[in-house]
Image (spheres, rainbow, N blue to C red):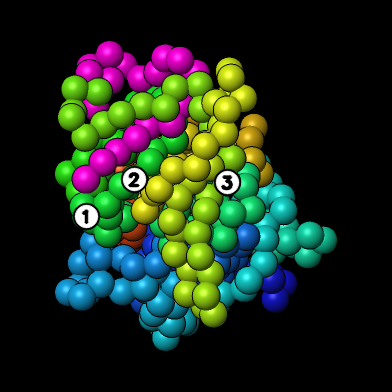
Amino acid sequence: MSDNHRKIIIIGSGPAGLTAAIYASRANLAPLIFEGIQPGGQLTITTEVENFPGFEHGIQGPELMDVMRKQAQRFGSESQFKIVSKVDFSQRPFKVWVDETLYTADAVIVSTGASAKWLGLESEKQFSGYGVSACATCDGFFFRNQEVYVVGGGDTAMEEASFLTKFASKLTLVHRREEFRASKVMQDRVLNNPKVSVEWNSVVEEVLGTVENDKKKMTGLRLKNIKTGAVKEVKADGLFLAIGHKPNTEIFQGILEMHENGYLKVQPGSTRTNIEGVFAAGDVADHYYRQAVTAAGSGCMAAIDAERWLAEHE
């Protein structure tokens, strides 16, 4: 076997990938983790994480991932900050390429996560984590008694808005059409809330805020009505994007079975994919919960599933 062969390769490095690495390395499987395009996953773009068990006073997202990574390395995991460009799961050992370099593995855990869809504004990137968020359940708590805006018109937007009304003093939905796509029940629940108003036929053109030294603070939004062309600036403490998530599954297309929305299919109650010896964990296979703690839990499951599968196939 070449130097590039491992018992387990883990593709992706959020809470799912790193928890899988902790369990796999403690089982003496010395996994290799390809950390990919966003080492540490989506948590690295959140600032404060208050809902991960064990941290009474919260912890910064990047710090939490760093601690997890060190924990995995302590037991013999190896992290490479590289992006997997291609895979071949048609026979064992499985083949994984980073550009031109080939690696092989007896088992693979896919934990490439999902990415929130963004509007694509420079200012939105600039204030990400400083008022701009794509996860109400993660960050809603920080907007107690503040004015927030939610972009979107589907069920996700209604869910996020509904959750945020528990904290915000005022909530405005911004939607580019004149009716929502969300189910009637969801719409009613949100629109009947006295805190909620809607900017129809509108888009966010710019996130406004202040940057002093390293301190960033979002202060408002520039909205444009796409029917009239009218532009106005509004005061806003927070902006939540609820225009969907996209699982990072492009390189597995035609190889691993997926749902219509691109999320990987796993066998109920397990992390097994349609290919024996390939497992999926975290947001790449979960469009429903999408929480750090559920991702970590499924990473643990994937490592145990892989370890048992390897033991059966030694």
In the displayed structure, 119 sits above or below 188; it is below
Mark 1: which amino acid?
Answer: Arg
Per the rendering, the mark at residue 286 is none
The residue nearer to you, when weighing 107 against 256, is 256
Q: Secondary structure at mark 3?
A: strand
Q: Are marks 3 and 2 in contact (CB under 8 Å)?
A: no
> Of callouts 1 and 3, which one flags the residue occurring earlier in the amino acid sequence?
1
Give the x, y percent position of residue 246.
53, 39
Q: Secondary structure at mark 1?
A: loop
Q: Residue furthest bottom?
A: 74
The residue nearer to you, when weighing 255 against 193, is 193
- What residue is shown with label 2? 148
Q: Secondary structure at mark 2?
A: strand
Q: Is residue 251 left or right of residue 170?
A: right
Instruction: Write the start and end of the magenta stretch as one range.
Output: 169-190
Per the rendering, the mark at residue 144 is 1
Give the x, y percent position of residue 101.
78, 64
Instruction: Determine the CA span between mark 2 and mark 1.
Output: 10 Å
Q: Is residue 16 visible?
A: yes
| Residue plotted at (53% across, 50% down) | 207
Instruction: Determine the CA span between mark 3 and mark 2.
Output: 15 Å
Per the rendering, the mark at residue 206 is 3
In the displayed structure, 28 sits above or below 159; it is below
Q: Is residue 109 visible?
A: no
In the displayed structure, 41 sits above or below 58; it is above
